[in-house]
Image (cartoon, rainbow, N blue to C red):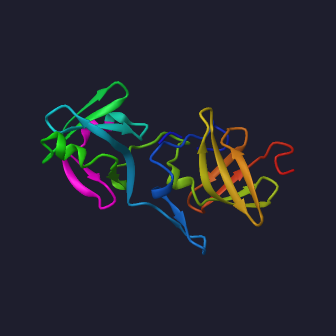
C-alpha cells in the first residue's frame, strides 16, 4: 500500500492498499473509512490445477500465506485460500472451488480484498491511504489549504494533492514538511517550502 507519522519523526509512509476504494469524503467533510482493503489483482491462470497469478498490491505480501479466506471482485465473493506462494514478484494463489484453468481464467482482472479488520498493524508514524485521504491540511502559520483529495506515488516519496478553494497544492510527504497528523480531528499540519504556493 506503501506509503505518514509524528511531528517530523521521519518521512510519512502510507502502505498500499490503494487509493480509490479506500476512502471518500462527503460534501459535509465527513471522512468515510473503507470496509475492505485491496491486497492484489488476479492477472491470469497459472498451471493446470486452477491456480491464479496475482499482482501484489500490498506492502505485506507475507499476508497471503496467513489468509484463510479472501474476497474477490466488486461483489466481495469469499473464497477459501488453499495455498499461496511467492513466485518472481507475484503470488500464486489456489482458491477453493477453482480447479481448472478455465475457472481461473474467469477471475482474470478481479481485485482481491481483505476486511479492514485484518489490516496489518503499522509502525509509529505510518498510515494507510484511507486514513490520509480527506484530511484537512493547515500550514503551521494557520492557513487552511483544503483537503487531501489524492495521493500520488512518485517512487521517492508520496505527494499529497490538496484541493482548496480555486487551487490545488502538491505537498511532498517528507518529514521536513509534514509536521503533524491528527487522525482524531481529521487534520494535518504542514510547513511548506518557500515558494510552493506561488
At a point 30% along the width and 62% down the height, the residue shown is: 75
Horizontal and vertical percent for residue 163? 70, 60
Q: Is residue 161 visible?
A: yes
Front one among 149 and 43: 43
Front one among 12 and 164: 164
Horizontal and vertical percent for residue 174? 68, 38
At a point 35% along the width and 31% down the height, the residue shown is: 90
At a point 48% along the width and 39% down the height, the residue shown is: 123
Q: Is residue 81 visible?
A: no
Question: With respect to residue 103, does 31 lie above or below?
Answer: below
Front one among 128 and 159: 159
Horizontal and vertical percent for residue 55? 37, 38
Q: Which region of the structure is painted magenta?
A: 63-80
Q: Residue furthest bottom?
A: 28
At a point 59% along the width and 49% down the height, the residue shown is: 151
Horizontal and vertical percent for residue 198? 87, 50
Q: How many marks?
A: 0
Q: Is residue 32 left or right of residue 172?
A: left
Amino acid at each position: 500500500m506503501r506509503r505518514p507519522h509524528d511531528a517530523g519523526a521521519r518521512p510519512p509512509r502510507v502502505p498500499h492498499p490503494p487509493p480509490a476504494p479506500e476512502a471518500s469524503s462527503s460534501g459535509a467533510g465527513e471522512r468515510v473509512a473503507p470496509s475492505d482493503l485491496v491486497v492484489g489483482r488476479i492477472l491470469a491462470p497459472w498451471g493446470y490445477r486452477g491456480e491464479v497469478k496475482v499482482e501484489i498490491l500490498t506492502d505485506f505480501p507475507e499476508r497471503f500465506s496467513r489468509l484463510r479466506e479472501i474476497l474477490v471482485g466488486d461483489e466481495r465473493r469469499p473464497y477459501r485460500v488453499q495455498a499461496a506462494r511467492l513466485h518472481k514478484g507475484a503470488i500464486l494463489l489456489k482458491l477453493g472451488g477453482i480447479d481448472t484453468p478455465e475457472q481461473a481464467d474467469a477471475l482474470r482482472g478481479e481485485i482481491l480484498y481483505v476486511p479492514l479488520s485484518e489490516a496489518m498493524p503499522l509502525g509509529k508514524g505510518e498510515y494507510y491511504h484511507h486514513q490520509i485521504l480527506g484530511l484537512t491540511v493547515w500550514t503551521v502559520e494557520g492557513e487552511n489549504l483544503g483537503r487531501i483529495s489524492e495521493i500520488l506515488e512518485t517512487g521517492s516519496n508520496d505527494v499529497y494533492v490538496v484541493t482548496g478553494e480555486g487551487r490545488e497544492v502538491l505537498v511532498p510527504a517528507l518529514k521536513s514538511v509534514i509536521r503533524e497528523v491528527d487522525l482524531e480531528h481529521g487534520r494535518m499540519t504542514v510547513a511548506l517550502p518557500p515558494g510552493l504556493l506561488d
